[in-house]
Amino acid sequence: MKILRHLCLSLLALISLPVLALSEASQTELKQLQTRWAEINYQLPEKQREAAFAELAQRAEKAVTGEPQAAELHIWHGIILSTWAGAKGGLDALDLVKQAKAELEQALKLNDKALDGSAYTSLGSLYYQVPGWPIGFGDDSQAETMLKKALALNPKGIDPNYFYGDFLQREERYPEAKAALEKALAAPDRPGRASADAGRRAEARQLLKTVEEKSTASTNK
């Protein structure tokens, strides 16, 4: 079974945890994590990805330990764990996606707007890709809620629109999926993320083709 390819907090706690800017060292490390993730995910041969993501996850964990109040680092630790789970596959990956979920939820507690709401995007993608109870925590209703929150913060973003499009096509809501994927393809470039943008656009184009084929087949039934 393939798992992947990536909240409750009191008002008092919210007030007590100020949003802190990333240190210069952590900003540099974040960019390096993002760059290496894109290299592994889009350029490395599939058989090599699991080990590479495992190594990158250790690096991300170290970064989080060094600056535990940085929501951005928790987000990227969660993203790396979830894509490592996707490379690993099978039920053995469930522990990794649970760890990813915990990291993303921690990011939301610290700053839900960090990286344009990327924690919502990644958590939403987990909810619709992970099996539901009793195997996992998958929940399509929660997935849509999270993805819509991501889109509210970043309506033109490539990732929230791509993952919402993927979710919608799995729900057989093809016209909505097509619109979301077209928005993903029209998304503005992200500074310093050229490789990730190119890889995501390739995925969006392929998924859009699939959506159009499924939509046509459904209409002709």
Image (tube, grey):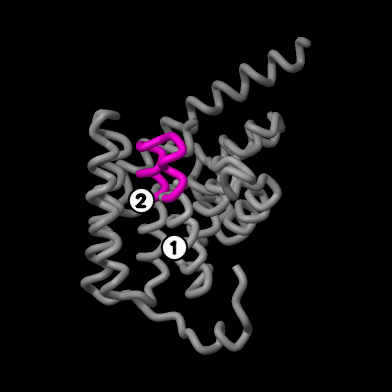
Residue occupied by mark 1: 103
User: Could you tell me the amino acid type at mark 2?
Assistant: Ile
How many residues crowd around disc 2 within 10 Å: few (fewer than 14), some, or many (20 or more)? Answer: many
71 or 48, which is in the foreground? 48
Q: Residue at x 58, y 40 (%)?
A: 131
Identify the mark at residue 52; answer none if there is no mark: none
Q: Is residue 191 above or below residue 17?
A: above
Q: Provide the secondary structure element on which disc 1 rests.
A: helix
50 to the left or right of 184: left
Where does the image place residue 168, in percent across and percent down from the top left? 65, 37
Q: Is residue 179 above or below residue 108?
A: above
**The C terminus: image quadrant:** top right
Tag 2 and tag 1, C-beta contact below 8 Å: no
How far apart are labels 2 and 1 at the CA level? 10 Å
**Principal SS element in the magenta part?**
helix
User: Could you tell me the amino acid type at mark 1?
Assistant: Glu
Queried whether the magenta region covers residue 152, the answer comes back as no
100 or 185, which is in the foreground? 100
Q: Give the magenta part as a residue range.
A: 81-95
Identify the mark at residue 80; answer none if there is no mark: 2
215 or 170, which is in the foreground? 170
Where does the image place residue 75, in percent across and percent down from the top left? 42, 61
Where does the image place residue 45, in percent across and percent down from the top left? 25, 29
Q: Provide the secondary structure element on which disc 2 rests.
A: helix
Q: Residue at x 63, y 84 (%)?
A: 11
